[in-house]
Structure formats: C-alpha cells, structure tokens
Image (cartoon, rainbow, N blue to C red):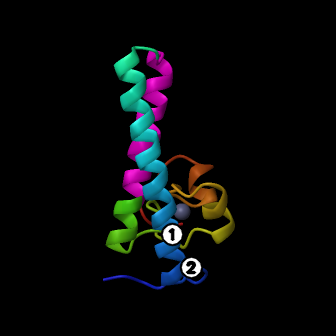
Amino acid sequence: MSIQHPEITSADLAEIRGRLEAEAQARSQLLAEGDADGELEEGLRLTAEQFVADLRDAIERIDDGRYGFCEACGGAIAAARLEAVPTAAQCVSCVDRPLRPLGR
Ligand SMILES: [Zn+2]
C-alpha cells in the first residue's frame, strides 16, 4: 500500500533511489578501504557507517512506498527538504520537537 506523495512522482523516486544507492555503494567502498588501511579514525568511521545505514534505510523506505512521508506524523515531507536531506525520515516540524505519538 502506498500513498502518492503530492510533490514526488515515481520517476523522481526512481532517480532518488539511484542516487542513494550509488552514494551507499561509494561510502561502503570507502569504508572498506579505510578499514583495510587502518587509516579511518574511529569517530569518522562511525559517522560514515551511520550515514550508510541512513542511506540504506531511505532506499528501504522507497521500496516500501514510505519514502517522503514523516515517520512521526505521517505527513508528506516537503520536496525541498528531501532535496537537501534525501535521507530525511521526518518532516521539519517533527525534527524540531521531541518525538510524539501520531497526531499533531
Ligand atoms: Zn512530521
């Protein structure tokens, strides 16, 4: 079951998915190389791993038809925000306030 996002078409989704996938691949590759060299600082590695996890999450949400909708309030996330933060899982107003159960 998926709801049509008011601003994002399925063609957009396919394009976003491609970008996220490429980014996740590239980051994983860098991580693997950094690990092999033992060059990557622990903090940096964790940040990079978290980012890859966020990318994979976003890809999963695209596949599930949940991408572009806020995990907290269920509302559509503005396309401008997704443009800036493609891995965003919450709308701006939910990020700005503590997590609450459904309802606004
Ligand atoms: Zn929200």
Please provide percent x and percent y for residue 32: 36, 30
Which quarter of the picture shows residue 65?
bottom left
Q: Judge left or right: residue 99 versus residue 6.
A: left
Residue 41 lies in the magenta stretch: yes
Element marked by disc 1: loop
Assess whether mark 2 and mark 1 are in contact (beta carbons under 8 angstroms). Answer: yes
Three-letter code, disc 2: Ile
- The answer to whether residue 38 is above or below residue 91 is above
Per the rendering, the mark at residue 68 is 1
Q: Which residues are magenta?
A: 40-58
> Magenta residues: mostly which secondary structure?
helix
Q: Identify the residue shown where x is 51% and y is 55%.
A: 87
Identify which residue, 46 or 31, lies in the foreground: 31
Residue 45 lies in the magenta stretch: yes
Please provide percent x and percent y for residue 35: 37, 22
Ligand 1 position by quadrant: bottom right
Identify which residue, 39 or 45, lies in the foreground: 39
Element marked by disc 2: loop
Q: Identify the residue shown where x is 63% and y is 49%.
A: 96
Q: State the residue position of label 2.
A: 8
On the question of residue 83 being in view, the answer is: yes
**Count of labels in the image:** 2
